[in-house]
Image: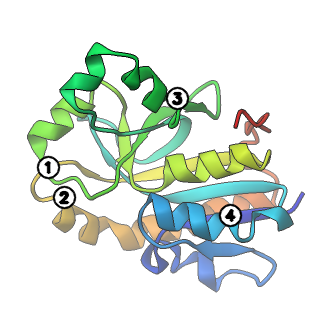
Amino acid sequence: MKRLYLFATEREAKASLELSEDVSILITGIGPINAAAKLASVIAAYDEIISLGIAGSLKEGIEGFQPISQVSKFQIYPESYKENKRLALHQSFTPDIELASKGAKLLTVDYPLHCSNLRQSLAKQADLVDMEGWAVARVCQMHQKGCQIYKWVSDLVREDSSAQIRETIDQLSKEAAHFILRCFDKEAPTEGQIYDSTI
């Protein structure tokens, strides 16, 4: 099976880039549009996509390595949409995507979150937040490729999130590299899913 390992940034991928040339790594850039565009340009050459990287926690007590079971896309809709069929129509454009039977729920947003009040609101929908996961899963779904997402919690979403990330990212990069090595030894979790396109 030919696997591609994804990271959003070079900082997250730093330790993994020092591994064997046999490891295929793609750095997509930050955000759902960059992730989708970069992955779509190469996905045909691979059987399975494994997305790795950091995520912010929306709930206190969630730490460390987190397999992802479901990804959702955060959207804001006008109040008027909630009163008619527009809401259901637009929600159908960004469906929740199931990846595994167990794991954390990941919410993908379009911008970095550094707000405790918003974290408390979004915690009703998901466990973790990032800026690429849903886009990666959607591209895999459209191309009928296997998809697995694993996150390392870098921070509890709040006003000092940036400082938390700077303190943890180098260690988390090393842990991601160790995870990839386990994949090559066939010790990594294998509960991915091949999707039927619903487009």
The amino acid beneath tag 3 is: Ser
Labels 2 and 1 touching (C-beta < 8 A) = yes
The amino acid beneath tag 1 is: Arg
- The residue tagged 4 is 40
Nearer the N terminus, badge 3 or badge 2? 3
Labels 4 and 1 touching (C-beta < 8 A) = no
Badge 1: residue crowd in 10 Å (few <14, some 14–19, many ≥20) = some
Q: Nearer the viewer, mark 3 or mark 2?
A: 3
Distance of label 2 from label 1 (alpha carbons):
5 Å
The answer to which image quadrant residue 63 occupies is: top left
Residue 96, x across and y down, in percent? 52, 30
- The residue tagged 2 is 161
Residue 43, x across and y down, in percent? 76, 63
Distance of label 4 from label 1 (alpha carbons):
32 Å
How many discs mark residues in the rendered view?
4
Q: Nearer the viewer, residue 20 or 157?
A: 157
- The residue tagged 3 is 92
Labels 1 and 3 touching (C-beta < 8 A) = no
Labels 4 and 3 touching (C-beta < 8 A) = no
Badge 3: residue crowd in 10 Å (few <14, some 14–19, many ≥20) = few
The answer to which image quadrant residue 126 occupies is: top left
Q: Is residue 19 above or below residue 187?
A: below
State the SS at label 4: helix
Q: Nearer the viewer, residue 51 or 197?
A: 197
Q: Nearer the viewer, mark 4 or mark 1?
A: 4
Nearer the N terminus, badge 4 or badge 3? 4
Nearer the N terminus, badge 1 or badge 3? 3
Distance of label 2 from label 4 (alpha carbons):
30 Å
- The residue tagged 1 is 158
Tell me if 173 is positioned left or right of 21 in this view: left
